[in-house]
Amino acid sequence: MRTGARAIVLGLVLALSACGGSSTTGTSSSNSYQGKTIQLGAILSLTGAGGVYGPSSQRGMVLAVDNINNAGGVNGAKLLLDVRDDGSLKAQSQQVAQTLIQQGQFLALLGPTLSNSAVAVHPLAESFKIPILAVSTTGIHIVPDCNYPKTDACTYVFRDSLGEETAIPTNIMVYAAKAHPATGVLMVANDDKFSSDGGKIVTNTVGKYGIQLLDTISFSKTITDFSVPVTKAVQKHPDVIFITSLGGIPASIMIEARKQGFTGQFLGGNGFNTAVVSKQAGDAGKGAESGSAWYLSNTFPSNAEFVRDYKARYGNDADQFAAQGYAAILILADAAKRANLTFTDTAGDRTKLRDAMESVNIQTPLGPFQFTTNHDVKQTVWVIAMDGHGGFTLVQSVNPS
Amino acid sequence: MAQQLLNAIFIGSIYALFAVGYTLVFGVLDVLNLAHSAVFMLGAVITYSLVALHGVPFLPAAGIAVLICGLLGLLIEFVALRPLRRRNAPPISALISTIGLALIFVAIVEQATPGTLFSWLWQDGANAVRFPTDAVPNPTFHVLGLTIEGTKLVILITTVLLLLVLGYVIRFTQLGRALRAVAENRRAATLLGIHVDRIFASTLFLSSALGGLAGLLFGLAISDISPYIGRDQVELKGLAVIVLGGMGSIPGAVLGGYLLAMIEVLAFVRLGSNVEAGVAFAALFLVLVLRPQGLFGARLRERL
């Protein structure tokens, strides 16, 4: 019964989105999709530092693929998802991407999990003209300038993950409006692009809200003993500690800082937004706020459906990364549906898919979803706070300007 | 600054405990056991799994983990070292085979998730975890403006006591004399009736038990536990410590451990993280240039 209902809802979502898209692209599928296969390749960090996030993305993607296939596929074509682990290593990520591209069968790629790897993988996809959809990379210079420092817009690179350039300033704005903090210390992993990008955004934002940055404490992403950098931060007596790292680092910093008597506020980035991190931080993380692309308890149908299916399938609650992975498959399925694919001319089909992606306008667990002209995500920012028990509560939602 | 020096002492204790195991094997077998960092990791992982997954109280869990790590030392000896020794393979072969074992140990933990073969050992794959907060009481003391955690104090006391016991064993017991004899001259020790293979096995057991203990203390008080804590946190530093102190010298490893931690912390506080590792290794380089045999200058005859 539930599968039937799911199939109907998904069918409706895809049908509605196809209607929305057709107004701008004018495409409809005159070619037969029946019995064909649409191959997608995902490069995710299932192990290593990004192992906190990659498996969630994978579970979201797999759920979406199965739901769509069970609901009849994309105009009758089955989705086939091939997930590869990049070990959270830039070089390995690039190697995996190269392998997937050379196989020549994939209509589009997803990932990689980490911004650090994306700067190596996305230019590759761009040069081979294969659409790639970033599902968790939130750093700067992901879209449109994937070849940074070159400023040319990359035309095959898209992102459905809310950028830190939007999420962090929104988070700081919301907190500053209610608590008026005067001072802050920034803790940043200087050998990680994600973290250092976030650090730059914090540095550029705090002044607008009257927050004086007392110190920027940088450390290596590989350290696990945070007593030394945290002592340095706590001894400055800031109102806020900004943490822009990912993996286990935010939780480690929060726990150590609370042990050392810090009673102020933690504000952070995308690295906060997973149940694993919230659970690791426990009591120490209670109240830590971040701007998120997704919120578990949103009740609009496309999220409620996703949350229920995810829980039924995996036995635990979804997180933002699963939602973005799920949304990515919906986006690609919607675009593929409208792209009038030939299934004989892979290069041509990739370009058709790219064109169709630009006009995506669908309901996803993230909310109503469209791409900006720069191929970035345009969506609501959900400012959330850790609840001390591995979950989050909603502080405020901020609509896109 | 006092708080930072205290931090350095706690970190230095772990470096020392880890490096003593490292240097013990080098002193006796003339081999660098690069699986030592994986055993360090397993000390933390096994204790964690016994406590968090199987409900064993912390102290028995720690005892079992140290014992298992000691037995893993025997595995290293029988699988990675002894067969090569029998074939008179050069030391570099033993080094490579221990790297192989280390990679296997890490991969076993890294791939272990619910439903897999090793899910009884670990269920979190590549993720980092922490001991449940109620597993071990960890009171925090505030003395003279310093924050001291109970678990870190335990690390310090355990390290000092263990190193004193180890020093006594090596200096004044039958086993210690046999260890020193084998370290000095394997052939002469054999002629004196010492069962050299048994001494090697005992050394690996002792060294790995110490490594496992260092790992579980590290996981308990200082760090998250993940498949990578050995590789990322102590492997290279442990090597630096034993070179700094003098290859094969136990007092050297202890001093080197505290010294490296002190240099790292001072460099971090004064100069920032960008130069922290650089300063530590520059100090190492300086020691090697001025005193190639390390601070404690262990020559072959004086090993251990």
Image (cartoon, coloured by chain):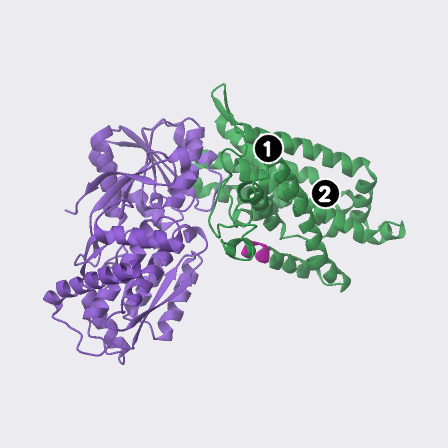
Report the mark closest to the observer, 1 or 2.
Answer: 1
The answer to whether residue A380 is above or below residue A4 is above
* Mark 2 residue type: Ala
The answer to if A283 sits in the magenta stretch is: no
Which mark is first along the chain, 2 or 1?
A: 1
Does residue B198 lie above or below A10 as drawn?
A: above
Q: Going by the picture, which residue comes out furthest to the right?
A: B192
Q: Residue A311: percent from the left, percent from the top?
A: 35, 51
Name of the residue lying farthest toward the left: A23
The quarter of the displayed image where residue A28 is located = bottom left
Q: Which chain is green?
A: B
Q: Amino acid at mark 1?
A: Ile
Determine whether the residue tagged by mark 2 lies in a helix, strand or loop.
loop
Res. B56 in view: yes
Mark 2 = which residue?
B298
- Drawn side of residue B232 relative to residue A349, left or right: right
User: Magenta segment range?
Assistant: B103-107
Corner quadrant of residue B20: top right
Q: Is residue A101 above or below residue A199?
A: below
For the question of whether residue B246 can be seen, the reply is: no
The label shown at residue B155 is 1
Which residue lies most toward the bottom here?
A344
Both marks 1 and 2 on one chain: yes
Q: Give the residue drawn at x 30%, y 61%.
A: A3
Report x, y in % for residue B304: 74, 42
